[in-house]
Amino acid sequence: MLMQEKISVSLDLFFDHLRFEKEASPHTVTNYSVDLAQFAEFLEVQGIDAPEEVEGKTIRSWLREMMGYGYAKTSAARKLSSVRSWFAFLFDRGLIPSDPAKGVRGPKLPSRLARALSREDAARLVEAGQSGEDPLRDSAVLELLYGCGLRIAELAALRWQDVDLDERMVRVLGKGSKERIVPFGTCALRALGSWRDSAETENGHVFPGQRGGAIAVRTVHRIVRRAALKAGVANVTPHVLRHSFATHLLEGGASLRVLQELLGHESLLTTQHYLAVGADHLRKSYELAHPRAKGDNGDVQGNDDSLCPEE
């Protein structure tokens, strides 16, 4: 059977929106098209001819079917995200009276701790920006991501009026339009100064896009991926650099309260979950700091029970 005409047309509109308005990569559009083609086939079997006929229970039934086919929870969650984006687009354009996907919950995913690079890997990656596609820009991007722990959207939105090179401070507009001040070091200062001198955009975005406005998020991802490849470090995203920033500060002695402010977290609980310290660092810190971890000669106590009397 052929896909229903109304659904086919609305999908084409959405894909054009991704390509030309969101400037999504061909890979991203392909992923959306695969997910939504599966959903459209399900709707066809259900006898649903138009997007406005879809209800929340329809989407939940489709999710159960996907899980029954053996899709992993992460895959099912991604497919649901595609469906949500499609319906949100249709609702925003006034093409459907309500958004049926808005209240649909996805499968509960296992929590995963963010990965942090070693200090050596992070340094190699940032330095690889000097041999990037646009060395001055790439170096400044990487120095801010790792040196300030900025979210990718925060970095993209940054304007020169928010940067104080003399005080080495940057004003960041984070989630919920909340401002915070984040310091940066001499390496970022040099990179930003060199980039500003070459870019000559002191009154606009720190990292302008090719078509005006801010740099595209996918461009920042590309800068990080290329630097990671040159540095020989696998599976690095801008978020990994943010987590590395926080973890290395914590290991260097920064308090969770300070990190909460630097990261822009509303709750300290978020910071605590975000900054799980590696087991090796915990053990070394314990051995250096706790009096019951050492023997009489100052060595790590190990199996020496001389300081631990039996109960």
Image: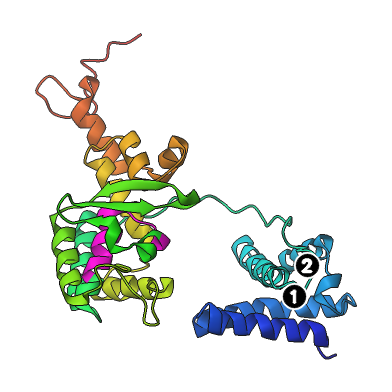
The percent position of residue 191, horizontal first and vertical second, equals: 17, 65
For image coordinates 54% across by 84% down, the residue present is 20
Residues tagged 2 and 1 counted as in contact (Cβ below 8 A): yes
| Residue 237 visible, this angle | no
For the record, the magenta segment spans 139-153
Q: Is residue 295 above or below residue 5?
A: above
| Frontmost residue, 160 versus 61 | 160
| Frontmost residue, 255 versus 53 | 53
Q: State the image quarter where residue 242 is shown.
A: bottom left
Q: Which residue is mark 2?
A: 62
Q: Which residue is mark 1?
A: 39
Instruction: Measure the alpha-carbon separation of dots 2 and 1.
Output: 7 Å
Q: Amino acid at mark 1?
A: Phe
For image coordinates 15% across by 72% down, the residue present is 197
Q: Is residue 98 above or below residue 11?
A: above
| Residue 108 visible, this angle | yes
Which quadrant, please, contains the N terminus? bottom right
For image coordinates 69% across by 77% down, the residue present is 36
